[in-house]
Image (cartoon, coloured by chain):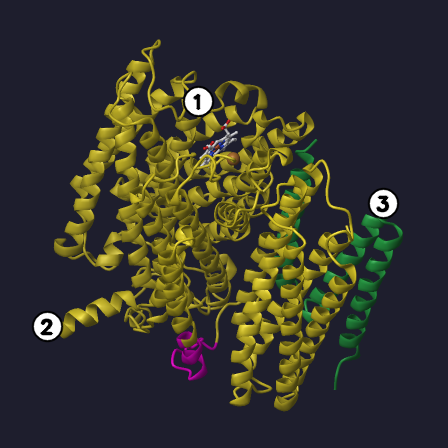
Amino acid sequence: MVKLSTLYVWAYIVAAVMAEVYISAYMRSSASGYTAISLLATSQATAVVLFYMQLKEEPNSIRLFAVIALMFLAALLAAMIATLG
Amino acid sequence: MMEQAINWLKGWLFTTNHKKVGILYIFTSCYFGFVGAVLALLMRTQLSVPDNNFLTGNFYNQAVTMHGVIMIFWFLSPLAIGFANYFVPLQIGAEDLAFPRLNALSYWLYLAGGIFEIISFFVPGGSANGGWTTYQPLGTSQFSPGAGPTLVFIGWILLTVSVTLGSVNFITTIFWMRAPGVTISRIPMFTWFMFFTIVAMLFSFPALIAALVLLVSDRVLGTVFFSLASIQPSILWDNLFWFFGHPEVYIVLLPAFGVIAEVLQVFSGRPLAAKNVILISTAIIVLPLSFGVWMHHMFVTGVPLALQNVFSISTIAISLPFDLITLAFIETLLHGNIRLNAPMLFALGGIVLFIIGGITGVFLSSPVLDRVFRGSYFVVGHFHYVMVGAAIFGLIAGIYYWLPRMTGRMYNEGLAKIHFIVSFIGFNVLYFPMNLLTDMPRRIFTYQSIGDWPLLNGVASIGAYIFALAQIALAYQVLNTWFRGPPSPPNPWGAATLEWPQVQTPVVGQEAPQGGWIGELNTENVGKEKLHDNLSSRPILLTAGIFVALLGVPYYSSSLGIATILIGLLILAYSVIGWAMDDLKERFVVQDSEAGERWPFHLVSKLKLGMWTFLSSEIIFFGTFIGAYLYIRAASPSWIAVGSVHSIPIGALNTILLVTSGLTMALALESIREGNQRNLLAFLGITFLLGSAFMGIKVSEWADLASKGFLISSQNQVISIAASSYYFLVGLHGAHVTAGLIVMIYLMKKTINGQYTKEEHRGIENFALYWAFVDVIWCFLFPLFYLM
Ligand code: HEM
Ligand SMILES: [Cu+2]
């Protein structure tokens, strides 16, 4: 039996791709458009990680790896952009 | 006779045994230490008197650069990794590392990288000469032309890859391979400190790999990441390099602290004071914070003042746990019953020198003082006190401490004491004057007779010779002990950690007796003494393929270069296929012990733990590239308009294809979880087709873009940098997809063989993770390049 969530996740990601394209066409180069697209992209990635990579079902100790890496990465990105002043 | 020699050679070249690999690491790193030392002595000779012309300016620059690179990356860390290879499995009662062949591969990649560093000196134009920090644009072809620097950077990438594979291996080993009874709280200090080191490696090296790959891409493919002044590439490099570089200083230091902690306990006959405080503060303060101080290396680059304040405070904060550790070390000594054997002398020496080096570091953490000291010999003094003083002295303590364990023989204590005294004096004569040379710029190849410069430099050079000569005693000592030393008792120091033969594995659920688990000879432990000779020729052959292929890269515009690359790729393909066949036919099997302490990973398989460890480093790796792209976008005065170059409909269609392949891969996994082999094959096939379609469309997009003049070589700077970022990042992603497609062929073959079942399908499980990860990256790349 195919898990329905697997299909829903796919449908969501495809819909989000469409939405991104739509937003970029109608809110071209606006800050709010960029924010919306970034949020959509992040939500797609999160869905893949949680469901296709099954992080949802892994123990917390495994999740910790991803969380730590993301924290360090966030520090790097934030400070890097901040150096530009 | 002949056959014996061949078997002996095979036993080393094909070994996957952790002890043998450890010994290979230790000897190889000492060889590179020797090379680094020769470069250092050349420099000190040049600087011994003012206005000297013993070396040319250009060669001095090469020497100063490669001395730093070789000492840090090919000597210090690998020496520690050598000890870790040998002793971490023993200390936790594991048969071997979690992935023995991967471990051998790490070693060979390390060696191959090192060979690149050395041959770089012998190609026309010589080696890299922009400093070990390779501040950009010094490393670009414009300022460092020739094949030499390219070889240096390629070799460096091999090393970083080796380290990343090693990190995955050690983390999995420490968490998953502990013998019953070795609970978290009973992990010995050396293993703990290696663990901290390796976690820092896991998350910091990917940023360095990314930076180096961008640099090599500039040099070889002609991208313009570090040569376009308008995007401030020097700051981009500084950030990436020091994000790695500061954790690196702890990577260098912590293994030595691990050794010092073991030695202090044993030679003061007393458990380490405040052990848990040390462990916890290292884990929750030093490790995370080491990723949040890097900008103290950039105080004078013009970064905003507010940012300087934040990083000045974090730098002072990170020095606090080290005060604590130092105090705990001293406290251990105060009440101890001290024996001053050579390991203890070197450990104590390391602590003293660390205190001096640490104090000079605190000076540098102040942005104001840093304005004065920056780029002077004071900095050189600072980091040699910590890197050579603390780290090397600590590791030499380890050599003496474990030599009896590795050879079964005892070294000469008198000679060892002389070695210590001469080293300690030589070290201070060499480096103390640098603390006073606050007004002399570092990295200059000669100087005029100003003030006390000639005196202090002359003294330092004399110290350098004393220190170097003292190390001959060490080399003699090691070889002499190895071949001729008198037999040593099995546990000469009365240590209580498991790597010593008479120490028993702890009894589950029982408190440790006074002095640890020392008892009658533990037969179980002695049994493990046999080297199980799992030989595999694949790791060395695979490395040979990579080595040959990369050797051709700087010369790819000549037919000889192309031929070299092709030969390398053939060797690589042969060994990869061989490795896959070994697995298919189950020719190299690692038996996992049934039981063991695996908390907090008792619910996951070994392979999955390894895979997630690897993926977490991949997050930083890809994230760094995406970050570099965001930085470039933020720094660029203008960019190409959305929709003007990349076709949004084609991009969107392709995205949907890839996402759908993610779905079918998930379905493939679900099928085999239910034991349905037919559906597994069908879904794998569809995934393969979708992935191939994605790549096909990519290729046609690229051809189209190129014909429209969207090229890296474009005269228009905006197009040139946009094309650089696009081709590079999308190309890198495409390479991952292609690699996935190749692996899928193997998976389908194995499926057809019926080798995946409901119970055993770890290969599919891990590939599904990889494939989904490739999906995740694309979720970001599509909007970043097509829509924003
Ligand atoms: C843990 C052992 C340490 C090691 C191995 C180490 C290593 C280094 C190295 C290699 C550099 C020179 C980088 C270059 O080539 O420009 C450096 C610079 C620096 N270190 Fe350390 N360090 C250590 C501890 C500390 C501590 C405890 C502090 C402060 C509390 C500190 C603060 C600094 C600062 C601020 C600089 C930048 C100096 C400058 O270039 O202006 N370090 N360190
Ligand atoms: Cu630092």
Neighbours of disc 3 within 10 Å: few (<14), some (14-19), many (20+): few
Label 1, label 2: how far apart the Cα atoms are: 58 Å
* Residue B253 x/y as whole percent: 43, 42
The numbered disc on residue A5 is: none
Write down the residue under mark 2: B1
Q: Amino acid at mark 2?
A: Met
Q: CA distance from mark 1 to mark 3?
A: 47 Å
Identify the residue position indicated by label 3 in the image. Answer: A30
The stretch in magenta equals B578-594
User: Do the residues at discs 1 and 3 belong to one chain?
Assistant: no
Residue B376's tag is 1
The quadrant of the image that shows the N terminus of chain B is bottom left
Q: Residue furthest top?
A: B451
Colour in which chain B is drawn: yellow
Residue at x-position 34% and y-position 20%:
B433
- Pointer 2 chain: B
| Rendered location of residue B341, percent (x, y) | 25, 42
